[in-house]
Amino acid sequence: MKNIKIFGTAIWAILCMVSCVNELDNYNPPNGGIKGNILDAETNEPIPLPVQGSTGAIINLFELHTDATMSVDFYAKYDGTYEHTKVFNGEYNVVVNGPFVNPCEGKVTIKGQTTFDLNATPYARINASASALGTSVSIQYNVAKTNTSFNVSEVYGYWNFAPGVDNGSANYAGKVTVRETSGTITFDLGNDNNYKNNLYKIQSNGNKIYVRIGAKTENVINYSTILMVVL
């Protein structure tokens, strides 16, 4: 009889656990999403951003008119776009923490998959083009401050064997620092050990490398678009 009671108690405990799990699983899944561009307020073009990750621009979604106390956080993409496909429908304040002169934020009502663009002003706009001659790669660039009072302290040229390129040490294979706000930065890859050590990766990717210009303005780094070069 004692064994029967123990067995019955065990069954009851298991049923309670299953019931609790079912209650936890009964929440409806997110029914909306958000995506858009982070646009230059003057040019209306997407603002190039750091690579998503530890150095990236973070998007914060703060749900309004609810008891929510935590934001939904995720990274913007390096091409100036962002997307999160699993967000609950509702009204949100969207805040982008990036290399912008003024706060970048706006209010949006998410209902299903919703597109919402935001506007911001970078500290500098950077135009760049690149060309290769053998294993010598040149980047022609121009850095334009968005305010004449701003100070451009350093300009960086980067190359990488992967498409993600920014000032994070894991996101470039080579880096050159200069002071000039316009000119040409050249990489002699034939004498670069990182190039030699990763040549098999580059060759398997069609001899492509990726380059970019960054400019530190008021201690904040803005970037050009990422350029692909075929050697």
Image (spheres, grey):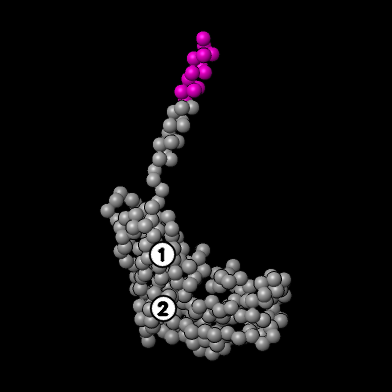
- Specify the segment rendered in magenta: 1-13
Q: Is residue 3 magenta?
A: yes
Which of 117/40 is in front? 117
- Determine the main secondary structure of the stretch shown in magenta: helix
Residue on which the image places disc 2: 45
| Name of the residue lying farthest toward the left | 65
Kindly indicate the quadrant of the structure image that contains residue 64.
bottom left
Which of 28/161 is in front? 28
Which of 158/9 is in front? 9
Please say whether residue 124 is visible from this viewpoint.
yes
Kindly indicate the quadrant of the structure image that contains residue 100.
bottom left
Q: Find numbered disc 2 in the image and state the secondary structure of the residue it sits on.
A: loop
Q: Quadrant of the C terminus?
A: bottom right
Q: CA distance from mark 1 to mark 2?
A: 16 Å
Which of 103/200 is in front? 200
Q: Find numbered disc 1 in the image and state the secondary structure of the residue it sits on.
A: strand
Give how far across and how far down residue 139 sits, in percent: 57, 85
Residue 35 badge: 1
Give how far across and how far down residue 196 sits, in percent: 72, 75
User: Label 1 is placed on what type of residue?
Assistant: Lys
Q: Residue at x 43, y 86 (%)?
A: 144
Q: Tell me the crowding category of disc 2: few under 14, some 14 to 19, or many 20 or more residues within 10 angstroms, Cα based.
A: few
92 with respect to 137 (left or right): left
Give how far across and how far down residue 35 sits, in percent: 41, 64
Mark 1 and mark 2 residues within 8 Å of each other at the beta carbon: no
Q: Is residue 138 magenta?
A: no
Q: Residue at x 37, y 57 (%)?
A: 112
220 with respect to 105 (left or right): right
Q: Please count the marks in the image.
A: 2
| Name of the residue lying farthest toward the bottom | 183
